[in-house]
Image (tube, rainbow, N blue to C red):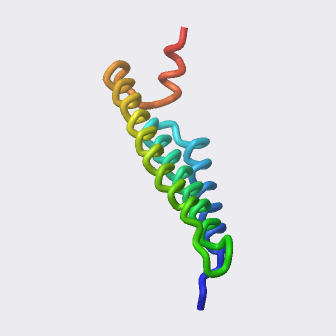
Amino acid sequence: MPIEPYTFIATSGVLLAVGIYGLMVKRNMIKMVMALEIMFSSAILSLVNFAYFRMYGFVDPILHVTAIIAISVEACLIGIALAFVINAYRHYKTLDIRELRRLRW
């Protein structure tokens, strides 16, 4: 029984919804970074899905290479975001977004 592309599209949609929920509801900065990671994974899953199911019997290697590059860029961005989170925690002793917004002048 072959796997249909709609299965992966639905999975990607669910991952995107979970990521958006995490960004909208959670106030902890680490949880928000994790939600961004889930959203990036959703986009990469969609890209690989479209690369595999583009033509019957042919897998597009360009889109797979693009997905590998996107994963490496995503890892760099998440590393930078976590560095900002650590710096904010060391300076303000909190990871709550609401508390950090009150510190504006």
Percent from the top left, x then y, of residue 40? 54, 50
Percent from the top left, x then y, of residue 77? 45, 38
Above/below status of 96 relative to 76: above
Q: Nearer the viewer, residue 100 or 61?
A: 61
Percent from the top left, x then y, of residue 25? 58, 43
Quarter residue 23 falls in: top right
Q: Nearer the viewer, residue 57 or 50?
A: 57
**Please, which residue is most extreme toward the top here?**
105
User: At 60% across and 87% down in the image, what residue appears?
Assistant: 2
| Quadrant location of the C terminus in the rendered image | top right
With 98 as the anchor, is 75 left or right in this view? left
**Please, which residue is most extreme toward the bottom here?**
1
| Quadrant location of the N terminus in the rendered image | bottom right
User: At 56% across and 51% down in the image, what residue appears?
Assistant: 39
What is the total number of numbered labels drawn onto the structure image? 0
Percent from the top left, x then y, of residue 97? 50, 29
